[in-house]
Amino acid sequence: MLYVRFPLSLRNVEDLLHERGFDISHETIRFWWNRLGPLFAAEIRRKQTQRMRAWPQWQWHLDEAFVIINGEIHYLWRAVDHEGEVLESYVTRKRDRKAASNFLRKTMKQYGRPKVIVTDKLGSYGAAMRELGNADRQLVGRWLNNRAENSHQPFRRREWVMQKFRRPGSLQKFSSVHASVYNHFNHERHLNYRRVFNHNRTAALATWRQLAS
């Protein structure tokens, strides 16, 4: 949880555990992350999907971020709902119509079709929307997509600490797990009373410990 949730390196987590009396190598933490991180994230994502299918989302925000892997540009596509929860992360080498279409298909297969899809002015979105029959649901505006653009910030902090990624598969794996854990612990403290925020934070931590047990 410390490694995925906070912008810490493996050695930072090793030092924190040492202060608490646990003598564990950073390579052990790497093993835990590779083995257990995707399992925890899959369970969190399953519960998220069930909740969102019961309460259909009326608006999505789509955006893509540049990620350099071994000197080559890749694209991290991200779908965010109107409350700021990350729905899907998808890594591609291009950002053409085919990549946008695959990204949308993957997201809609899991969450269904929203009423409104907010995008920037990238032409690939419009082509993909027409291909999937969603052209009438697309909303384009310069300042309308801040939800998606802001969702990249926690990932960018993690990318800086990890000193970039070396393989597209590693980027896809980490971005998916990081998004699920971020959703689980993100309760938008600035929108809630302190009492409500504390209750939600305690419940999220209890659920995580239940998964870890």
Image (spheres, grey):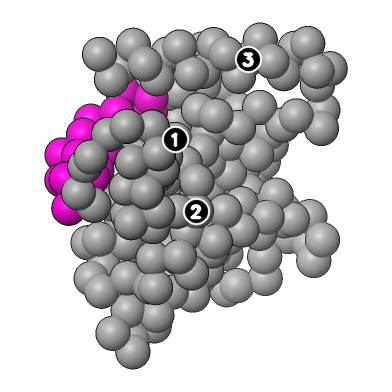
106 sits to left or right of 179: left
Residue 106 sits in quarter: top left
**Quick one: SS at disc 1?**
helix
Quarter holding the N terminus is top left
Residue 68 x, y percent position in the rendering? 39, 80
Residue 40 forms part of the magenta stretch: yes
Residue flagged by tag 3: what amino acid is it? Asn
Vertical side of 91 occupied by 66: above or below: below
Residue located beneath label 3 in the image: 200
- The residue stretch that appears in magenta: 27-45
175 sits to left or right of 167: right
Residue located beneath label 1 in the image: 181
Instruction: Identify the residue at image location x=54%, y=64%.
Output: 156
Residue flagged by tag 2: what amino acid is it? Pro
Looking at the image, is mark 3 or mark 2 nearer the viewer? 2
Instruction: Identify the residue at image location x=45%, y=65%.
Output: 161
Marking on residue 7: 2
The secondary structure that dominates the magenta segment is helix
Residue 97 forms part of the magenta stretch: no
Residue 35 x, y percent position in the rendering? 15, 39
Marking on residue 52: none
